[in-house]
Image (tube, rainbow, N blue to C red):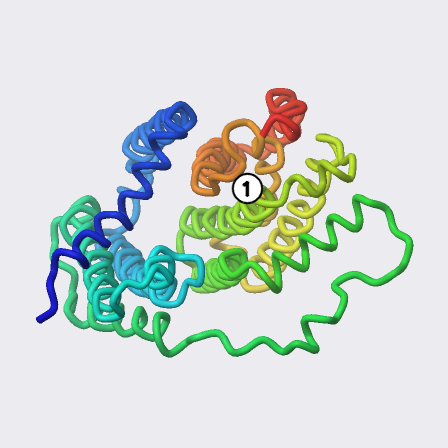
Amino acid sequence: MLKLTTPLRLVWLHNKQSLIRLRYDFGREVVVIISAITLLGLFFYIFHDFLHQKVRDIPEPIRERLIAGFLVSLLLLLGPWIGGRIRRLWSEDAGWSTYTERLGENPRMLAAFRILQSCLVIGASYALYWLWLLPAFTSKPLAQGWLWQVLSLGLGAARAWWLQPSAPDRRLQLEPILDDREISRVRTLILWRWHQLTRRNRLSRLCLGLALVLQLAAIGLGAWAWPFFLIILLSMLSSLLLASAAAFQLEEDMRAIWFERQMGCSHDEYVRVYQYLCWGLGAAMGLLALTGTLVFRKPEVLPLAEAWKILPIAALFPSILPSIMFQLAPDRPLLQILVTALIGLFLGTAIYAHGLALFLVPLFTHYAKHYQSDNFYRT
């Protein structure tokens, strides 16, 4: 008969890893936690004091549909995220379960451990959503919540079991990413990261895809004469997703940062690489937003004197990231995203309120870079 003592012990040891990492990197983790709590507090203050007043101007039916759509989207995204965690648990080569299997653990015990850990991940994630996140946004029950829950579980199952990556083609792996032309080091680093961002890094590619979808949705809302504030808000979210793509790529780069250091890459040179990369992403999204808005807008609802603001707002958030990426923890993308969102929210609302606030962006980036001077070699 299968005993539960060993699987439960494996579950405890598997989750104890996070506590051990916290213990041996306690000082840095405390700084990160305090910074995250401070940023979340500022977000709560801003959303409660400023955006809450703006949201009240939106008609009640539209507001309820927006909140319901946001909550349903989170629930549907939660399923694939859980599925990815479970897939890594069952297939990771360097994971805890593989290590115990090489030590001679009973396969039935390992299967029981994986099942218990999978149930723990699923139960904890969905309990956090239904018991804390959903009541924080609305007091009304989610319409057809059971159907969205089943669909979220289905997406998670597809992510975990059926959408396995295909076997790599060895011939494609041997193809060079860069050619043999003599180009500058900065351009080489930019092309390398562009390849990683658009073809290799899954989280970055997901963020880029979601950013494009949100920006197209913002253009559609403009064509349907929705309030310009909602169009700007969607453009801000799209711009933040672009910055998130760069932040996730920065996390990957931090795992092999020794390579650029061995090449003699300077702090300014490395920051310039991300600056050019983020400028390119922001400019492309800003031009798309402006072109779509000008083509589909209704002049009597959205005058040209206001419509142009969507270009700098859509390009704003990725332009901020290179100025702050070495100030706290470049290997913590969520912290980078929080800081970028907080600063971008201030600058974006200032540009939305008055066009002359656009001059604050280069002023901020100029002075913000001084606070992370030479941190490339200290990280």
Quadrant of the rendering where the N terminus is positioned: bottom left
Q: Residue at x 11, y 63 (%)?
A: 3
Q: Is residue 88 left or right of residue 62?
A: right
The residue tagged 1 is 317
Q: Is residue 210 left or right of residue 176?
A: left
Q: Is residue 305 visible?
A: no
- Residue type at mark 1 is Phe
Query: Relative to 89, does residue 317 appear above or below in the rendering?
Result: above
Expressed as whole percent of the image width and height from the top left, the position of residue 22 reads: 35, 33
Determine whether the residue tagged by mark 1 lies in a helix, strand or loop: helix
Expressed as whole percent of the image width and height from the top left, the position of residue 205 reads: 54, 61
How many other residues sit within 10 Å of disc 1, few (<14), some (14-19) or many (≥20)?
A: many
Q: Is residue 11 visible?
A: yes
Residue furthest to the left: 1
Q: Residue at x 32, y 43 (%)?
A: 17
Q: Residue at x 47, y 54 (%)?
A: 301
Query: Relative to 233, does residue 53 appear above or below in the rendering?
Result: above
Query: Relative to 283, does residue 73 appear above or below in the rendering?
Result: below
Expressed as whole percent of the image width and height from the top left, the position of residue 60 reads: 22, 52
Q: Residue at x 15, y 69 (%)?
A: 144
Q: Is residue 320 left or right of residue 344?
A: right
Residue in front for this viewpoint, 103 or 330: 103
Residue furthest to the right: 182
Q: Is residue 135 left or right of residue 342?
A: left
Res 306 quadrant in image: top right
Residue in front for this viewpoint, 192 or 12: 12
Expressed as whole percent of the image width and height from the top left, the position of residue 286 reads: 61, 51
